[in-house]
Image: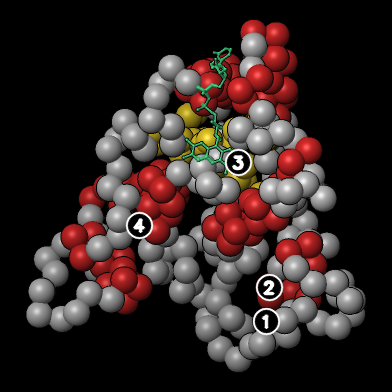
């Protein structure tokens, strides 16, 4: 299988760097082909702007999504965006690896999504009508591919449990896992989270590495998170609210998981 790891950490000699080296080696040992988009090393351009479109007239105002649509459809996207899109087409699985920064991914990785996920590529795909609201949330360009997050945190596991002060980890990762991965069609397997990284020593590092190795060995076997698919009857269209018989009385992120 082909695995793309999109990796964001500014220092190679970090915990994330060590786990990234391990993950690449483990996947290769298992016979997979691996590419890493090391965003800091690539000096990835983080901001989405008019420079992302080649041969663009400066007369018209820049419109982030319509310019993206035009550039994608006409082969006028910036070359760095096209290269990452080709990697996504090539990949059978996408792994996002990052330290949690301010309850999300580092800005450089957010910028990868904003720029690489073009209109026509990751959104605005499929029929848009009163009966079919696009190929998304379970359908789309990434259908048939898997995705997994590897994330490290300073906070303890208990800080992220159902009643923890930071809020549940499933909720914190929902915008990424549901909004950025499930949306264009990825099957998202549960994340691999390393909590309380300041308490890492050799023994714990070995245990962490072993646990990560097991998750990578079973990347294609583990059941994906059972997010509800948009176009399979669970939601009213075009309101896109859950039908009354699903998750009755439940609100919030958890209602969107079967
Ligand atoms: P490092 O600092 O490189 O390492 C962590 C520990 O692992 C160190 O003790 C190191 O000695 C040890 N280690 C490293 N490599 C090895 C190795 N090969 N073998 C054995 N031990 C090793 N945390 C949250 O929980 N929520 C947040 O919202 C949040 N926001 C943040 C925002 C910012 C801007 C920053 C800078 C930090 C934030 N943090 C937050 C903390 C952050 O998530 C952690 O600092 C980060 O996950 C640690 O990962 P690292 O790769 O940088 O670890």
Q: Nearer the viewer, residue 113 or 141?
A: 113
- In what element is the residue under mark 1? loop
Residue ranking furthest to the bottom: 130
Let me know if residue 224 appears in the view. no
Q: Residue at x 18, y 60 (%)?
A: 51
Quadrant in which residue 52 is drawn: bottom left
- Badges 4 and 2: C-beta atoms under 8 Å apart? no
- Badges 1 and 4: C-beta atoms under 8 Å apart? no
The correct choice, above or below, for 145 with respect to 257 in the image is: above
- Disc on res. 115: 4
Across and down, in percent, residue 3 comes to 52, 35
- In what element is the residue under mark 2? helix
- Disc on res. 230: 2
Task: Please tell me how crowded label 4 is: few (under 14), some (14-19), or many (20+) other residues with Cα within 10 Å.
Answer: many
How far is mark 1 from mark 3, CA to CA?
27 Å
* Nearer mark to the viewer, of 4 and 2: 4
Q: Which of marks 3 and 2 precedes in the sequence?
A: 3
Asked whether, in this view, residue 203 is left or right of residue 16, the answer is right
Q: Which of marks 3 and 4 precedes in the sequence?
A: 4
- Badges 4 and 3: C-beta atoms under 8 Å apart? no
* Nearer mark to the viewer, of 2 and 3: 3
Task: Please tell me how crowded label 1 is: few (under 14), some (14-19), or many (20+) other residues with Cα within 10 Å.
Answer: few
- Disc on res. 227: none
Q: Which residue is mark 3?
A: 149
Across and down, in percent, residue 247 comes to 87, 72
- Disc on res. 240: 1
């Amino acid at each position: 299988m082909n695995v793309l790891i999109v990796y964001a950490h500014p220092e190679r000699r970090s915990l994330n760097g060590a786990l990234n080296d391990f993950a690449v080696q483990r996947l290769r040992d298992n016979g997979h082909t691996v590419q890493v988009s090391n965003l800091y090393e690539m000096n990835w351009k983080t901001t989405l702007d008019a420079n992302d479109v080649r041969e663009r007239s400066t007369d018209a105002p820049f419109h982030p999504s319509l310019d993206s649509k035009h550039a994608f459809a006409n082969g006028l996207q910036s070359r760095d965006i096209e290269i990452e899109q080709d990697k996504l087409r090539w990949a059978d699985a996408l792994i996002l690896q990052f330290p949690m920064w301010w309850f999300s991914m580092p800005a450089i990785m957010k910028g990868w999504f904003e720029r690489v996920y073009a209109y026509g590529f990751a959104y605005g795909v499929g029929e848009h009508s009163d009966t079919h609201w696009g190929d998304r949330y379970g359908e789309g360009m990434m259908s048939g591919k898997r995705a997994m997050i590897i994330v490290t945190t300073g906070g303890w596991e208990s800080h992220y449990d159902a009643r923890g002060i930071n809020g549940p980890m499933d909720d914190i990762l929902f915008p990424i896992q549901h909004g950025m991965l499930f949306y264009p069609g990825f099957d998202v397997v549960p994340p691999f989270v390393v909590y309380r990284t300041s308490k890492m020593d050799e023994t714990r590092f070995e245990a962490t590495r072993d646990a990560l190795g097991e998750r990578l060995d079973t990347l294609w076997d583990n059941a994906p998170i059972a997010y509800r698919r948009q176009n399979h009857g669970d939601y009213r269209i075009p309101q896109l609210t859950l039908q009354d018989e699903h998750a009755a009385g439940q609100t919030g992120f958890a209602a969107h998981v079967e």
